[in-house]
Amino acid sequence: MSTKSNAPVLVSKNVSVRFPLNSSASRWRLLFGRGIDSWHDALTNVSLSVPRGKIIGVIGRNGAGKSTLLRTLAGVYPLAAGRVIRLGPISALFELGGMGGLLMTGQQYVIRWLRLNGVPRGDWVDLIEEIRNFSELGDRLDDRIYTYSAGMAARLYFSTATSIGNEIYLIDEVLSVGDEHFQAKCWKRVRERLAKGVSGVLVTHDWSAIMRLCEFTCELEGGQIVAEGDSEAVICGYLKLSDQLDPNRLARFSDECPISVSGISGKNWDFEVPIVVAADSLVFFNYSIEKLILGEDWQILFIGSETLVASSRGDYSVKIQVPNLPLPSGQYRLNLFLSGTKPEDGGIKQNFDIRSWTTGNSIKLHVDGIKESALVKLPFITEFV
């Protein structure tokens, strides 16, 4: 039974959406009152539930139905079947800027948005100033939007759309607006909203954004949910990187390769990786360490140096040694890579084998020691002169 803390705030039940196909035959049928005989099924029997305080990810390729689903949840498109239940006010972060013309000034756009969203007039002055500062437009907020660059317009639209807090957010790719500096501000604002218990749906091509915000993800294909569950598993299936590995590859990690290793923060750490080389060939090894907490954080902390480890057929063992392991206590992912030489034509070198969460077989690294807020502990020496 759901409690108030995890009860769903947004639910779609067996939702289907259809659009009429625009053809001369359909137009003649409409003209003579015979109805439309040709339809496109944009969504078919889609069901999802958004718990309070959680953001659900939706990923899929172009044309999968992601944006249609988001607009359907917002009530933009009529349903052919099913129903949508909304248990709170919604802030829709898609098609930002759609309610204003380019001849409007930035401030006129903000005022129109505030009016249409029912914001009390007494709050307008403070909100306009807050939007002016967050967007970093300054005096340019008084200029017409057609004089803005694409980045400036994106900053205006995002700042306005997120200026007031709502319980449910429907987000479509907006975390990639502007330059890197402003993207960081977007992330910070979304994090602040999440800390206050908001819920929502994020649809995006950027699977890394889903890893950072969403514990649960759905994959759409052809207007239907084809996979759902833990974000890591769904993203792994979506990327299909393991399918790119040749089953008859020249080198691979041995079946005796560990699935978990451990170390102690600040102590020397080493482990061995067995590999099998099936033919005379140059084989290169590399590794990386990542911090991955679904719905909270994903960071690549270390990337090693690519090293030649074999040139002929045989069984080998690669030993990794890290002095004074500079990781605070916690859980990490150790990724391993075997590759060949880069082609003479400058193409992409062949990957022989991979151990990574993106292929569903990463090695879990557990580090004991004192807990610290830092991601990495870099040694330093203090010298008094």
Image: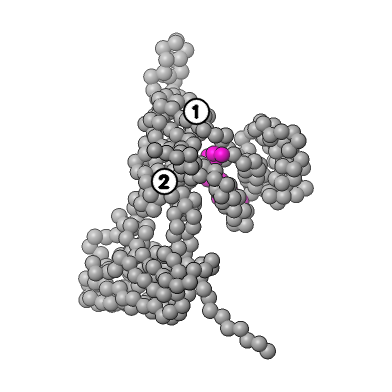
Q: Quadrant of residue 344?
A: bottom left
> In this rendering, does residue 104 appear at all?
no
Q: Report x, y in % for residue 254.
A: 24, 69
Name which residue lies at 46% across and 30% down.
84
State the residue position of label 1. Answer: 77
**Taking 318 as reference, is 173 left or right?**
right
- Where disc 2 sits, the SS reads strand
Circle 2 Cα neighbour tier, 10 Å, few/some/many (<14 / 14–19 / ≥20): many
Q: Residues within 10 Å of mark 1 (few under 14, many from 20)?
A: some
Residue extent of the magenta highlight: 167-178
**Residue drawn at x 23%, y 67% as measured from the top left:** 255
**What is the spatial separation of the Cα atoms under label 1 and label 2, in whole angstroms?**
23 Å
Q: Amino acid at mark 1?
A: Tyr
Residue sticking out furthest to the bottom: 385
* Residue 277: image location, x then y, percent: 24, 72
Residue at the spot 42% in from the left edge and 15% down from the top edge:
35
> Which image quarter is the C terminus in?
bottom right
Residue 25 lies within the magenta run: no
- Residue 232 image position (x, y, % from top left): 39, 53
Are discs 1 and 2 less than 8 Å apart at CB?
no
